[in-house]
Amino acid sequence: GALGVITAVTLAVEPIFLLTAREEPMGFDRVTEDFDELVAENEHFEFYWFPHTGNCNTKRNNRSAGPAAPPGRVSSWIDDELLSNGVFQVACSLGRAVPATIPSIARLSSRALSARTYTDIPYKVFTSPRRVRFVEMEYAVPRDQAVTVLRELKAMVERSPLKISFPVEVRTAPADDMALSTASGRDSAYIAVHLYKGTPHRSYFTAVERIMTAHAGRPHWGKIHTRDAAYLAEVYPRFGEFTALRDRLDPDRMFGNDYLRRVLGD
């Protein structure tokens, strides 16, 4: 990493528990109007908005006393493999070849998954197979600005000639006390945009980044973005604390590279 070689990691863990997932379609206007309530009422809330539509798929995950009630094997295969991967792969390939079809495909895709509720151990609830390859940009914005950012993003897509085949992912996280965590010192909403592999992404990502940076957005350190140390020092109050530690631990920049020089400075 930027500070040297990690030789040991200590993990804080807890006994296994169950989560109940409630997935259901919901309109964009309702999700944004009720966003604060949906976040407050659930341990974990996330949703996907399908550009060129007013449709979203929502997911609420909360701890459960059980019993476990995983989704059926057949229905799970239909939702998670056939529709979310197989059919979506075909749709993305068609959209890349004929971009004019993307809005119609988005309207169909956004209605393909039905509501479902199931209970299982956490990794089976939090994760899902993602076999359709993509490029991604993700920004963390102050949670109280999330709805404004999302409405600006939707308006940008609607007035532009862009054709966006991938849904926009939205999730939240509480503030933490790590210097360069994207949630450092503030409750955050994470807004991730994607495009199918091989699709030119610069115009879309540039337009999205313009919105995010206008709201003091913090880019995901491991995904596409164009920010530099000067910008990041403005949005991370403890940025100087980290760079001072870097100066002490790696004064000769043995662990430096082009990316670190851009985001942390020389």
Image (cartoon, rainbow, N blue to C red):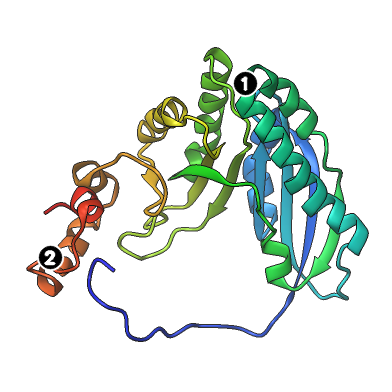
- Residue 26, given in percent of the width and then of the height, sits at 77, 36
Pointer 2 residue: 253
- Residue 264, given in percent of the width and then of the height, sits at 20, 54
- In terms of secondary structure, where does tag 2 sit? loop
Identify the residue at image location x=66%, y=52%: 131
Position of residue 42 relative to residue 65, above or below, is above
Q: CA distance from mark 2 to mark 1?
A: 45 Å
Q: In what quadrant of the picture does the N terminus appear?
A: bottom left
- Residue 105, given in percent of the width and then of the height, sits at 74, 26
Please give the label number shown on residue 15. Answer: none
- Residue 212, given in percent of the width and then of the height, sits at 41, 35
- In terms of secondary structure, where does tag 1 sit? helix
> In the visual, does 134 lie left or right of 105?
left
For the residue marked with disc 2, what is the amino acid?
Arg
> In the visual, does 183 lie left or right of 4?
right
> In the visual, does 70 lie left or right of 99?
right
Category of crowding for the residue at label 1, using alpha-carbon neighbours closer than 10 angstroms: few (below 14), some (14–19), many (at least 20): some
Category of crowding for the residue at label 2, using alpha-carbon neighbours closer than 10 angstroms: few (below 14), some (14–19), many (at least 20): some
Q: Nearer the viewer, residue 238 or 102?
A: 102
Identify the residue at image location x=55%, y=20%: 155
Please give the label number shown on residue 99. Answer: 1
Residue 191 seen in the figure: no
For the residue marked with disc 1, what is the amino acid?
Pro
Picture quadrant of residue 20? bottom right
